[in-house]
Image (spheres, helix red, strand yellow):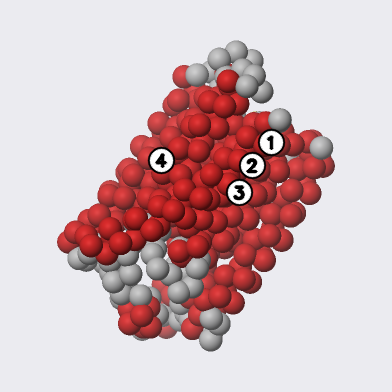
Amino acid sequence: MAIWTSVFAAIAAFVITWLLGFWLIPLLHKLKYGQTILDIGPKWHKEKKQGTPTMGGIAFIIATAVCFAVGMAVLGATGEVDWFGADKSEFIKTTAGAVMALLFGFMGFLDDYIKVAKKRNEGLSPMQKIIFQVMIIAAYFATLYVSGLSRTTIVFPGGLQWNMGLFYYPVMGVGILYLVNAVNLTDGIDGLCGSVTVVYTAVFAVIAGLIGMHGERLLAFCAGGACVGFLMWNFPPAKVFMGDTGSMFLGGIVCALGVGCGVEFLMVIAAMIYVLEALSVVIQSTVFKITKRIYHTTEGKRLFKMTPIHHHFELSGWSEIKIDAVFTAAAAGFGLLAAVLAFGMFG
């Protein structure tokens, strides 16, 4: 059965990522690729986390890519799917999504490399990042369009559908841009992004199975298994950080699964923790600017102690483990809601 191919691929991704840590972490130490902690974060981050190796996301990117490629080959070889016949469209969509995630990971790698090589807080400029990301998203949609797989309809529970026409592409492009960077923002404390992403991929493994998309389910299993393997090294206190290399890749995976399965609405629900993390930054910045103008002061008011919002709870006295547990539980709640809605739509 195709499900077992995905299960074995997830186990292999876990083992490969975990084992790569024994080689990669010492190598990153040797290269002195330590994280330069941003000055805008909590003080103790700079004191306790400065110099911890970064770019550890390389491990789970390798594991995900290898296990996904082998898994796709096995599915085709065993006759579970016909990648060059009846299932060709899914092959293109799933592969295009995986490549998009890899390109986001490559952009994150460039950003990390500039930081560690030049020993500075900032890597690529914000404009460079946006241009790079827009190009990746445009290439993804262009691939689907040229392949005759363009789709402009958003599906909602209850059989409701909204055909957005050509507006789908810019709107969903902005959505992907938001989500990818939201996942990046969630990677602010040890173990958080990896834990939340494990839940997200588990949810989409279920959703993809309901829809009957074996390739998307395989991708979800591979990414989820690799994230669990990385948590063996990243759980508090972290021995290595995933860096933008890893978080941008995971952002791409999040979007590839949601858009690839054609369930953008469910994607937003399952990804609500990421959405709220980024939204807290937007709200904080907006309130700060508005109150600054209203009171004519150099400093505006802040709604949260610090954003993204996980730092607010950190400054409120929560430990990293407690934040990980609460946020992951909340992600599971949103994920369960998305799964239940999926059963109503496709079950």
- Can residue 261 be seen in this snapshot? no
Q: Amino acid at mark 3?
A: Thr
Secondary structure found at label 1: helix
How far from the left and from the top, in percent, is residue 81? Answer: 64, 21
Residue 248 coordinates in the image, percent (x, y): 42, 51
Q: Which residue is mark 2?
A: 7
Foreground residue among 295 and 245:
245
Q: Earlier in the sequence, mark 1 or mark 3?
A: 1
Whether residue 245 is visible: yes
Crowdedness near tag 4: few (<14), some (14–19) or many (≥20) residues, C-alpha within 10 Å: many
The answer to whether the residue labelled 2 contacts the one labelled 1, judged by CB atoms less than 8 Å apart, is: yes
Pair 1/4: label in front: 1
* Label disc, if present, on residue 162 of the rendered structure: none
Label disc, if present, on residue 201 of the rendered structure = 3
Mark 2 or 4, nearer chain start: 2
Question: Which type of secondary structure does the marked residue at label 4 adopt?
Answer: helix
Question: Can you identify the residue that label 4 sits on?
Answer: 102
Report which residue position mark 1 lands on.
3
Of residues 51 and 341, the one drawn nearer to the viewer in this rendering:
51
Mark 4 and mark 3: Cα distance apart in space: 16 Å
Report the amino acid beneath label 4. Leu
Image quadrant occupied by the C terminus:
top right
| Among the two numbered marks 3 and 2 on one chain, the one whose residue lies closer to the N terminus | 2
The answer to whether marks 1 and 3 mark residues whose Cβ atoms lie closer than 8 Å is no
Residue 40, image quadrant: bottom left
The first of marks 4 and 3 along the sequence is 4
- Whether the residues at callouts 2 and 4 have beta carbons within 8 Å, the answer is no
User: Type of residue at label 1?
Assistant: Ile
Mark 2 vs mark 1, CA separation in Å:
6 Å
